[in-house]
Image (cartoon, helix red, strand yellow):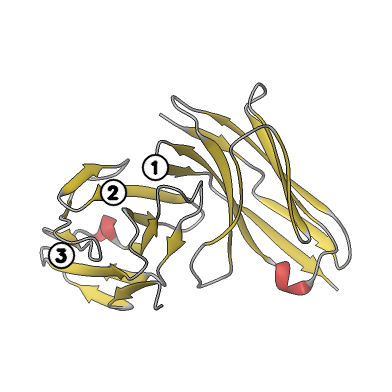
Amino acid sequence: NAGVTQTPKFQVLKTGQSMTLQCAQDMNHEYMSWYRQDPGMGLRLIHYSVGAGITDQGEVPNGYNVSRSTTEDFPLRLLSAAPSQTSVYFCASSSFSGGGSQFFGPGTRLTVL
Amino acid sequence: GQSLEQPSEVTAVEGAIVQINCTYQTSGFYGLSWYQQHDGGAPTFLSYNGLDGLEETGRFSSFLSRSDSYGYLLLQELQMKDSASYFCAVRDDYKLSFGAGTTVTVRA
């Protein structure tokens, strides 16, 4: 099992550009989520999904879109990048029977100039 | 909304015991989780308390008191590799809300 994979690992964007951060998991987990982590802060939930075709907003959804067409994939789209979106982005997945355990991907380090 | 408080930093020597407290205020509560994150790495799951009491996993233990909206993570027999950030997280349905993290520094 590869677990949770994310691409790219690093990305530099210019203000106004758009891009998609990829996330995939091979554990057949129902729940997937995206977080951002800024220095000195915990992880903040951007969007989440409880199954294919179902998504919902988290704490900081503005400027981001998601879709969940399959159980495995949960891409995060930045519509028009802004310097405030410079952060480390983590994707995570879990099963509904997993209690409070989520499996995290390695992260994408995004810089917006 | 969710609000979690935990100390920002803790320093201890190898072999010591460290307790990281976490207090929370939440609109919904299913349980309290703990995660470890080394510099530059991804968070990894340590433990989960859905019910009051103590959960033990090797050198790490976690405790929850739902009536006090309080929990802690106990790190025993500290090792250098335990130097990391530790986050408590409240589970509300399937969503997790994280605290700001506690940086644990282990000295020789």
Secondary-structure class at tag 3: loop
Q: Quadrant of the N terminus of chain A?
A: bottom left
Residue A48 position in % (x across, y down):
28, 48
Identity, as a three-letter code, of the amino acid under mark 2: Tyr
Crowd tier of the residue under label 1, counting other residues whose Cα lies within 10 Å: few below 14, some 14–19, many 20 or above: many
Where does label 1 land, which residue? Answer: B95
Q: Residue furthest top?
A: B67
Crowd tier of the residue under label 3, counting other residues whose Cα lies within 10 Å: few below 14, some 14–19, many 20 or above: some
Q: Quadrant of the C terminus of chain A?
A: bottom left
Q: Residue furthest right?
A: B15
The residue shown at (11%, 67%) is A17
Chain ID of residue with mark 3: A
A37 lies left or right of A18: right
Q: Is residue B41 above or below residue B30?
A: below
Where does label 3 land, which residue? Answer: A15
* Disc 2 and disc 3 on one polypeptide chain: yes
Q: Quadrant of residue A35?
A: bottom left
Q: Quadrant of residue A106?
A: bottom left
The residue shown at (17%, 51%) is A63
Tag nearer the camera, 2 or 3: 2
Identity, as a three-letter code, of the amino acid under mark 3: Thr
Residue B69 position in % (x across, y down):
62, 27
Q: Which mark is residue A48?
A: 2
* Residues at marks 2 and 1 touching, judged by CB atoms closer than 8 Å: yes
Spatial CA distance of label 1 from label 3 is 30 Å
Crowd tier of the residue under label 2, counting other residues whose Cα lies within 10 Å: few below 14, some 14–19, many 20 or above: many
| Residue A113 visible from this viewpoint | no
